[in-house]
Image (cartoon, rainbow, N blue to C red):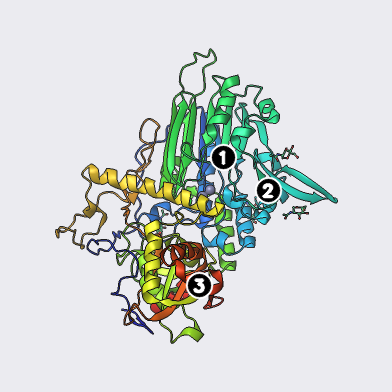
Amino acid sequence: MIRTPFGVLSSLAGCALAFALPRQQDEFRGAPELPVPTRPLDWGDVNFLSTSDTHGWLRGHQHNTWPEPNYSGDFGSFASFASHMRAKADADGVDLLLVDAGDHHDGSGLVSSSPEAAGLTDDIFGMLPYDVLALGNHELYKYEAARWIYDRRERWWVIRAGASDSRNGRFLTSNTNITVEEDGKVLDVPIADRFAKFKTKQGRKVTAFGVIFKFKAHDRNITVQAPSKMAKEAWFLDAIRDAPDYFVLVGHMPARGETSEWLPLYDAIREQHPLVPIFIFGGHTHVRDCVQYDGRTIAVVPGRYLETIAFTSSTLPPAEDDGKALRMNRRYIDANEVSYRWHTGTTERSFNTALGLNISEALFTLASDLKLSRVYGDVPHDYFLTRHPYGHPRSIITVFERQILPEALEDEKRRDYPRIVIGNAGSLRFDVFKGTFDKNDELTVSPFTTSFFYTRLKLGVGKAIANEMNRAGASKLQPMSAQEEDEAHVQRVYNEWLAAQWNTYLENGGDEADVYEESDQTPLGRPVPRKPKTLGYVTHDACPGRGDDIEHIPVPFSPNQVDFICTPLSGVSDNEEVDVVVMDFAMDDFLVAARSLRPDLRLNWNDFKPYAEGTLINAIFSKYAKIAW
Ligand SMILES: *[C@@H]1O[C@H](CO)[C@@H](O)[C@H](O)[C@H]1NC(C)=O
Ligand SMILES: *[C@@H]1O[C@H](CO)[C@@H](O)[C@H](O)[C@H]1NC(C)=O
Ligand SMILES: *[C@@H]1O[C@H](CO)[C@@H](O)[C@H](O)[C@H]1NC(C)=O
Ligand SMILES: CC(=O)N[C@H]1CO[C@H](CO)[C@@H](O)[C@@H]1O
Ligand SMILES: [Zn+2]
Ligand SMILES: [Zn+2]
């Protein structure tokens, strides 16, 4: 129960839509003992480890709620893994390349604390020598972030690692330019190299590119060319003219679907080289995916937040090329030390390499400098973004609406005025887990700096507007900004992927009960056996064979979510005037809904005044944690 100036709120519904709710359950919480892989990797002549959309999760996932422990490997353990994999490749006389498809920024506390912190995190990323890296849209929203890369393009890999060969790794920006002023001249130049031709340790010739989908929301003085246009550029056609042993295309776009623009590049290459293998590594939609465009092309996407490392392998054509399909494979490895050790035959003692330990230490030091481990409270339960429907007591959106906002958003001067608060559910980005809640968790759950404004309206009118906003749905009322559109697209594709996993599981006789702990009661009231598998991703992609390294039960997903929240208010009649507080991100939708419902009120931005001035949304979480957790 939470007491606020407006009474006890926890049992009240918000003023938006309601869904029928299942029984309340606690989540499964075993000892964080990780499942062990059972199938060795299928090595080929050419092998890749790929990452994408790490969004600053370089310290790994640190909570005990499943499936988090599965992704507990930090970037240092990944570096150790990569070193052992390289050593194995060298010993076997095969290629192993390391590639990343961008989106390093905006996510965990490391990169969301400040632009400087994001840059310092980039430098730590640069300690691990990748063969090819691409930029994501999150490196292009702010000129400074792209400039950070540009300024380091020649020495990206030597900053901390002490590597002697500065061309050991390559940032490739085939279709992205930056405008810079140098020696009084204004130059429009690619941020890094447009392409690279290099030889692997085994002497194989590689031609590589780094691209991004045609996106519009980039900052000023950055230019992004559509991949379909790039495919016609003279420099590109020139770069692909000589046949390498294989092509490597790394880029920030999915393997298929709406924002995927691999096909024009693929077609251009195939026109000149019908048989040269093409390896494509994508990202952006945060899902695990794989598709083969032909028997000698594979496109692999490794998911998000350093949860997955994708391993891709292939044979190469025989000397007397028979033109036949190659044996191509992909495996989605859960990013943790147990998986890493199993696949490299290392032990707890032999696993960590000097570079891996250095990286972990650099991450620890940066996190300490940023005070990311400062604890604000102890969360009593797991609260999830999409595992439960809106209205469920373990839905973070619901708890935010009914407890956190009512309790922790405060305007000294408006204390005596009853109020409702209307905002975007999309301003929350991640689950909140049982256990300590620290600065990193706060920045992760909501990295945004949205603020609040209020006007005076009858309570009934405010509630009706909130309902209208939800009826119309986010973005349907108001054309979104290009950046919001990018974000909403990623969220939609990722949520559809989660929903499909969960629905397939239920359709195949999977039991919701298996997700919960022994002591819990199922919805049917019978005790549940301890579950045999851990929660995680269950991937059904378009490549042959099983992609997931570990078999999981999918994470439950509820489609019953709202786009907008509205805090409850009791003891006030619908006819009374109250403060109607609106988050600035939700303001456009609010005004459109208000004008359609009550055109007579002629509401616009000027009718609003700042509320709780200086309060940003993410600070509300730490404030609440200090009071209630
Ligand atoms: C773009 O960069 C140029 C050169 O540094 C600068 O003069 C100009 O003001 C920038 N334009 C914008 C819109 O920021
Ligand atoms: C990027 O910069 C290069 C070098 O200045 C220039 O030739 C090219 O036209 C630019 N590309 C785009 C799409 O602006
Ligand atoms: C690890 O860090 C130490 C101290 O900064 C440095 O001397 C050493 O070269 C580093 N080793 C590797 C493999 O990065
Ligand atoms: C092997 C491994 O990474 N184990 C970790 C599993 O997750 C728990 C909690 O997140 C960690 O404490 C373990 O070290
Ligand atoms: Zn991303
Ligand atoms: Zn992206």
> At numbered mark 1, what does the secondary structure look like: helix, strand or loop?
strand
What amino acid type is highlighted by mark number 2?
A: Ile
Horizontal relation, residue 263 to residue 169: left or right: left
Residue topped by disc 3: 619
- In terms of depth relative to the viewer, which is nearer, 224 or 385? 224
Q: Residue at x 27, y 45 (%)?
A: 505
What amino acid type is highlighted by mark number 3?
A: Ala
- Image coordinates of residue 408 in percent, x first then y, are 44, 77
> At numbered mark 2, what does the secondary structure look like: helix, strand or loop?
strand
Circle 3 crowding by C-alpha within 10 Å: few under 14, some 14–19, many from 20: many
What amino acid type is highlighted by mark number 1?
A: Gly
Q: Is residue 498 above or below residue 454?
A: above
In three-dimensional space, the C-alpha distance between marks 2 and 1, rounded to whole angstroms, equals 17 Å
Label placed on residue 222: 2
Residue topped by disc 1: 251
> At numbered mark 3, what does the secondary structure look like: helix, strand or loop?
helix
Q: Quadrant of residue 331?
A: top left
- In terms of depth relative to the viewer, which is nearer, 192 or 484? 484
Circle 2 crowding by C-alpha within 10 Å: few under 14, some 14–19, many from 20: many
Residue 432: in sight, yes or no? no
- In terms of depth relative to the viewer, which is nearer, 491 or 474? 474
